[in-house]
Image (cartoon, rainbow, N blue to C red):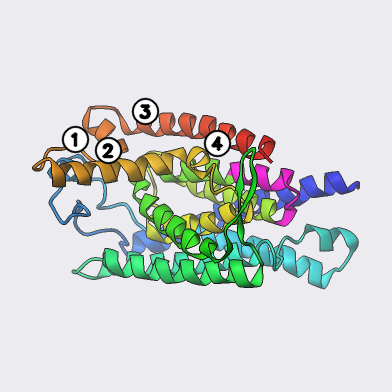
Amino acid sequence: MTPAILNVVKVFAPSAVAFFIGILITPILTNYLYKHKMWKKRAGKVAPDGRATPIFNELHRTREVGTPRLGGIIIWVSIGLTTLIFALIAALHPTVVTGKLTFLSRNQTWLPLFTLIVASLIGLVDDWLEIKSSNGGLSFRRRLLLVTVLGLVGALWFYLKLGHSSIGIPFGGELASGWLIVPLFVVVMIFLFSSSVIDGLDGLAGGVMAIIFGAYAGIAFFQNQIDLAAFCAVVTGSILAFLWFNIPPARFYMSETGILGLTAALTIVVFLTESVVTLPIIAFPLFATVFSNVIQLGSKKFRQGKKVFRVAPVHHHFEALGWSPAKIVMRYWVIGVIMAVVGMIITLIGR
């Protein structure tokens, strides 16, 4: 087996394994979630500024009750088991091939895997409290604080242990940023954390995140970051397993235990591939989600309560206009694929 073919196998084989593991563990998780009624007891939400959201609550008055949360467990458990399986195979049956197939490495995958698991566990706690506590889950401030601390730890490891201190500029080489890489890292993680509100329609977050991680698998592969490419492919495979059961009508929701881990891990991947500048293109649906919220809040604050969108984020605006959820989700997927491809091209040819 030539090195080039082995690299391809190294990327695609773990992705397929993660998908099938996700499919296999889903019945176990589903039975538990429905048996213990792991869903919100009351539909609706409150806007980030603390105001009521009557239009959203009317649109979703029956959707958030009766369908379990915690579906994101499938994603990070699949990733963890796949990583463990390939590492154990290499340890128990050491050969050139098995050693090459394991993708767990200090300089490429330790940090994104650690971040994914820790952030997912934070999301798990939030979801558990949302289900079991009458006061809801963790407050936005607490989640923001935890994400900030996690981002700071990741940034310091990235800067001090891995020695990264520059940002890739398409067609402009690298921009040395020194210690400023640390606050930039934290800001990007917080921004992506804010995009977690995209998890609002069946299949939306799963499809968008699978496209984004698939794009980064391609970028890492062509930059010869094969371990990182394999990690991104494993994430993609696990998300697709989740998406198999999240396509309308959803069997369960991804919720915070899924989306929080994915956005946190994405931050690490972005900096490891030195593609911060092209992130808004590759992850365009996430940026559109965040900025629609920012525009809405700014408009209500500075224009005496006037709104730009009927509901924010923007995918709920389309829903309020009468678009079917499936139509919104499919068009997000189409836009996501096109923008991810454009972002990949700019990132790779701009080196």
- Element marked by disc 4: helix
Magenta residues, start to end: 214-227
**Is 129 drawn above or below residue 27 in the view shown?**
below
Instruction: Kindly identify the amino acid type of the residue bearing the numbered disc 3.
Output: Lys
Which residue appears at 28% of the width and 67% of the height?
A: 141
- The answer to which of 50 and 64 lies nearer the viewer is 50
- The answer to which of 231 and 155 lies nearer the viewer is 155
Location of the C terminus by quadrant is top right
Provide residue 112's location: percent of width, then percent of height: 58, 62
Cα distance between the residues tagged 3 and 1: 18 Å
Question: Looking at the rendered structure, which numbered label has been put on residue 310?
Answer: 1
Badge nearest the viewer, 3 or 2: 2
Badge nearest the viewer, 4 or 3: 4
Which residue appears at 50% of the width and 57% of the height?
A: 74
**How many C-alpha atoms fall within 10 Å of the one at disc 1: few (<14), some, or many (≥20)?**
some
The residue positioned farthest toward the left in the image shown: 304
Question: Looking at the rendered structure, which numbered label has been put on residue 316?
Answer: 2
